[in-house]
Every structure is written in C-alpha cells, then in structure tokens.
Amino acid sequence: MIEKRDFYINGRWVAPATPNDCDVIDPSTEEVCAVISLGSEADTNAAVAAAKAALPAWAATAPADRLAYVEKILEIYKRRQAEMGAAISLEMGAPIDMAVSDQAESGAWHIQNFITAFKDFEFLRPLGPHAPQTRIALEPVGVVGLITPWNWPMNQVTLKAIPALLAGCTMVLKPSEISPLSSLLFAEIVEEAGVPAGVFNLVNGDGPGVGTRLSTHPDIEMISFTGSTRAGIAITKAAADTVKRVCLELGGKGANLIFADADDNAVRRGARHCFNNSGQSCNAPTRMLVERPLYDRAVDIAREVAETTRVAPAHETGAHIGPVVSAAQYDKIQGLIAKGIEEGARLVAGGLGRPDGLNRGYFVRPTVFADVVPGMTIEKEEIFGPVLSIIPFDTEEEALSIANDTIYGLTNYVQSADGARRNRLARQLKSGMVEMNGQSRGAGAPFGGVKASGRAREGGHWGIEEFLDVKAISGWDGK
C-alpha cells in the first residue's frame, strides 16, 4: 500500500484540520491500495488563503520567469513519467504500458504545447490601427479552483494547472478522490521545480465537501471543472452567488459517421477508439453510424474487434484494456447493457458480467450492440464503458440528424473519401471538435464542446486565455 500523503498548502505538506480518511481502491483487485485524507472546509479555506496571499507577487512575476518554472516542471515530469504512469495505473486501472505511453505522456504533451504557445503570447495588444491609443490588456483572473476527474488524471491536471501558472493565477487543485495519487505526485513535481509557496495548492476531497466550498468561496474568482454534466450544472448553480467565471468540460456521446467509401480500417479504428481506456473517455466515439451498404460488414468487424480485445489486470504489460474505475461505475455500465437488451438492441458481442477468467475486479466485457434505434437509452446516455452502439443510415442528411440529436456536443467523427462531404459535415455537426479519417487534432488545438458538454476550450492559446480577464485601456501613451 502506498504511503499516505496529506495536503500541499502554502509550499508545505500539511495534515488535515480534522482527520477523515478515505480508501483508494485498486480496480483490478478491489483492494485498498492507498489511504488519503478528505479535506474539510477549514482545509479548503487555508488553501484559498495561501493562494490569495501569493497572488500579487505571482501575478507581477515576469512572464519569462513564469515560463521558466513551467519548463522546469516539464523537465522533472519527464524524469518521473514512469512513476506517474504507475500511479495512474494503480489508482484508475489503465494498463501499465498504456498508462505510461498515453495517460502520463498526455501530461508532458500538454505542458510542451503550452510552452510553445506561451512563447509568442502577448499580454498587451493594440486594438488595431483605427484606434492607436487603445490597448487590450490580458490580466490574471485571480485565485482559481481546479476540479479534475479520475479518467485521464494528468491530461486534465496539466490542461488546467499549467495555463493557470502561465497566466499568473494562483490555484487550489481538488483532484478526484478516486484517483488522487497522480495529483499528489504532480504536487511533488511542482514543489521540486521551486514554484513559490502558495501559488499551487492541493486539497483532496469529494465534490460535496471541498468541491462545493471552492465553488462558493468568495475569494475564488474562477472554477475550472471537468466531469459529469450533472456535477457541472451543480457547480454552476453553486458559483452563481459569487459571480465566478465557470469553465466546464463535461460529458459526450460522440457520433462516428462512417460512409460506404470510407477507408478499409475505418470501422476497426472506430471500435478500438471506443474501447480505449475501457471506454472511459468523454470524447469516445460510442455511436457508430454506418451507411447502409457497409452496415452488415461493419457489424462483423466491430464484433471481431470486441471479441479480440483482451481484458486483463492493469499491472500486466501488453496491449489490452483494464477494469473500469469503481464498483459504482461497473454497476452503472451493467445496468445500461441490460437496458440495451431490454429495449431490443441486437447484442452481437460482449454483454453482461465479467470476461471469462476474471472473477474479481471491475472488468467489463467489450460490448457491441447493432440495430440500435435513435432514442434508445444506450443511444442517448453516456455509458462511460466499453460499449459501442451501431446505427444504420441511408442518407447524409439522416446521419447528420441522428448525430446532432443529443444533448451533448463534444467530439464527432467523419470517415469518408469524399473531401467535400467531410468538410461540409465538419461545419454542420454540432460539437466543439470534429476529427475525420483518423486524423487527430494538431498540437495546441483547443479541446472542448458545446451544449451539455460544456464550453471550455482547453489547450494552446485558448487554454491560457481562459485564465485571463480582458481589459480595454484608452488614451494609451504609444511611446
């Protein structure tokens, strides 16, 4: 079991004001792998007070000096990346190879992209030649609360903490109590990098406790939250009385539109993407819409992918998927699989229960439903597990209508050899991101959605600007 660590407040590791232990569960074994403390209102207040006290000096620090701290963080992060991957694998069940190469690597990737974006970032900009004495100043929002999820821990911590540091904000991070170990390691990295006391603070806790206190605290100017749409709505309501900025990156129900002229690997690529990270990604393409001439073949390919996707404990090396994160998540997924069967979708792979040979741990069988009808529960609700729904369509217009008929709007996907069609659909799909023919977003492209997926834009210039207020200044002396 991992040694217990307490909170990181004002540059020191401190014990909680009132001990309230919480077990961290290894989802591969269902056994306790670590114990953390859950913070109280007093702990949260102490962290906010430290961040508030550190704000004036940090906001006044030269951008080049803030950049140097982040570059040092990246250097240490890369040195400890294997350790970071091991922590993520243990706490949330990502297979160890994937945890190092994808989960932990995503943090290094984002830090480097922010460094690149920041090198030409302008905090004072002319409005334009028509207004020679008007300047636009970008200034730090202030003390920010960062609330991050369990499914891609370092992806989300770095997408929030790094741009906040660069912008000149001070912060309090509340990682998920389900996967806190990686964030505790990140705090060690920040400490080793020499970031001044009070700039970065970490308090473990749950949503109703620390999360709610951050959302309502009068000295917090902004909440950046990634998680469920339900929790995002609650945070928005809680923050309303103090008129905070609230940036939300929430759930998704991505549609993957596969046309008959798609490349030979399109269906296989889409199914694998759905099952990656055991389906626990908000941008997973969980609705596969297939043009009728390709439909039967697509169902067969998706079945083959599901049946050949190995499921195994997270500590084992190799290409496989691990467990889902918790008993509650396992039970939710099982209930939705049962609902799909009950509502008449055709189960072609997987189904209820654990995979053969695994009688302990939160393991889910990679599952494929065909003949899914728009409006079915599994077509509407975010399952957050390795469950793929396949839906036939006859026309481009029908595919577009089905894809957009959802409360969510995070990522959609298009597979077609017809460039004009791809471009047309990319503009018509109601989502913050569209990926086509297996092409990932470029370095520094923003991540975020619309509608019930929230409207945050994380990454690159956009991610830094989220932590800045815009000030218009007229009568500027141009000298």
Image (spheres, grey):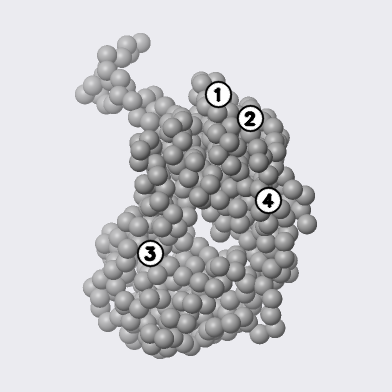
> Counting residues from the N terminus, which is met first, the one under dot 2 or under dot 4?
2
Query: Which quadrant does the C terminus fall into?
Result: top left
Coordinates of residue 377 in the picture (x, y in percent): 38, 76
Residue visible at 66% across and 41% down in the picture: 18
Residue under numbered circle 3 = 412
Q: Which mark is residue 10?
A: 2
Nearest to viewer (mark 4 / mark 1)? 4
| Distance in Å between CA atoms under marks 4 and 1 | 29 Å
Query: Which quadrant does the N terminus fall into?
Result: bottom right
> Counting residues from the N terminus, which is met first, the one under dot 1 or under dot 2?
2
Q: Residues within 10 Å of mark 3 (few under 14, many from 20)?
A: many
* The one of 77 and 132 positioned closer to us in this rendering: 77
Residue visible at 62% across and 47% down in the picture: 38
Q: Residues within 10 Å of mark 1 (few under 14, many from 20)?
A: some
Residue under numbered circle 4 = 21
Coordinates of residue 417 in the picture (x, y in percent): 36, 72
Which amino acid lies under the numbered mark 1 shown in the image of this protein? Ala
Which amino acid lies under the numbered mark 3 shown in the image of this protein? Asn
Which amino acid lies under the numbered mark 4 shown in the image of this protein? Asp
Q: Is residue 367 left or right of residue 104?
A: left
| Distance in Å between CA atoms under marks 4 and 3 | 41 Å
Residue visible at 67% across and 62% down in the picture: 25
Total numbered labels placed on residues in the image: 4
Coordinates of residue 465 in the picture (x, y in percent): 41, 37
Marks 2/4 in contact by CB < 8 Å: the verdict is no
Residue under numbered circle 1 = 53
Q: Tell me which corner region of the image, top left, top right, bottom left or bottom right, holds residue 245.
A: top left
The vertical placement of 114 against 315, above or below, is above
| Distance in Å between CA atoms under marks 1 and 3 | 43 Å
